Image (spheres, helix red, strand yellow):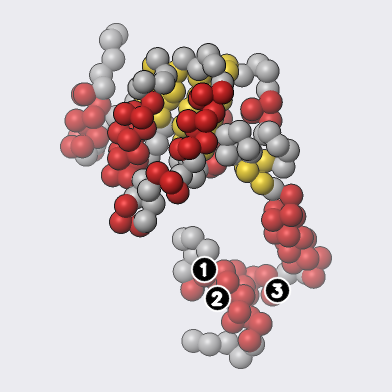
Amino acid sequence: MLYTSPALETLIERLSSLPTIGRKTAARLAIYLFKQPDAEVKSLAEALYHLKERVRTCSVCGNITEDDPCAICRDPRRDQSIICIVEEPNDVLVIERTNEFRGLYHVLGGSLSPLDGVGPDELRIRELLLRLSEEKGVREVILALDPNVEGEATVLYLARLLHPIVPRITRIARGIPIGSDLEFVDDATLAKALEGRLLV
């Protein structure tokens, strides 16, 4: 259904082009914004503008930042000898929330997906190799990629590429979530949990 307002229709089209937002959700958001005070809508528009004006990717790790290099890369308390490789900047946020990792990051900008036209040249692999050649003393690279087909392909590719360069290459563990029951765990997850079992 097309609305009688071309401006409203344009906004719905723009919102529905965002990931995970369908046309119905976009229409609800557009009408919600229409009902808000002018100051609220202006504030949202300014936040969007400032995002594009001020935010960039870190020239070292590829994370999102306003200052280059980013705060994590500049932090002298971080362990410079460990680099955790992730697919996207939001993966950095997820790992940082745990307060368990104190090393550095490298954001690839995606994962290998030949069907979608994403090969090694479309990812920040060249920058990773350059970084590892310049930053002496990196003793471990942690591969923290999504456990899907593309993530697995990227892990295998990077492991082969990095073995001659880095003494230790690890990947994050996969398995059964804390608080779940074995009877509800799928076969693939249970198989990976058995494969990656730990000493007690």
> In the image, what residue occupies the spot 64% across and 27% down?
73
Q: Is residue 142 visible?
A: yes
Q: How many other residues sit within 10 Å of disc 2, few (<14), some (14-19) or many (≥20)? A: some
Residues marked 1 and 2 touching at CB (< 8 Å): yes
Disc marking residue 140: none
Measure the C-alpha gap from mark 3 to mark 2. Answer: 18 Å
Q: Quadrant of the C terminus?
A: top left
Q: How many other residues sit within 10 Å of disc 3, few (<14), some (14-19) or many (≥20)? A: few
Eyeballing the image, is 184 above or below 194?
below
Q: Nearer the viewer, residue 143 or 192?
A: 143
- Please identify, in this view, whether the residue under mark 3 or under mark 1 is nearer the observer: 1
Percent across and percent down for residue 60 are: 61, 33
Q: Nearer the viewer, residue 152 or 159?
A: 159
Measure the C-alpha gap from mark 3 to mark 1. Answer: 22 Å
Residue type (three-letter) at the residue carrying disc 1: Ser
Residue extending farthest to the top is 200
- Please give the residue where the numbered disc 1 appears in the rendered image: 17
> In the image, what residue occupies the spot 63% across and 86% down?
6
Disc marking residue 35: 3
Residue type (three-letter) at the residue carrying disc 3: Lys
Eyeballing the image, is 47 above or below 88?
below
Pointer 3 or 1: first along the chain: 1
Q: Is residue 147 visible?
A: no
Residue type (three-letter) at the residue carrying disc 2: Glu
Measure the C-alpha gap from mark 1 to mark 2. Answer: 6 Å
Percent across and percent down for residue 2 are: 53, 87
> In the image, what residue occupies the spot 54% across and 41% down?
89
> In the image, what residue occupies the spot 28% across and 44% down?
149
- Please give the residue where the numbered disc 2 appears in the rendered image: 13
Residues marked 3 and 2 touching at CB (< 8 Å): no
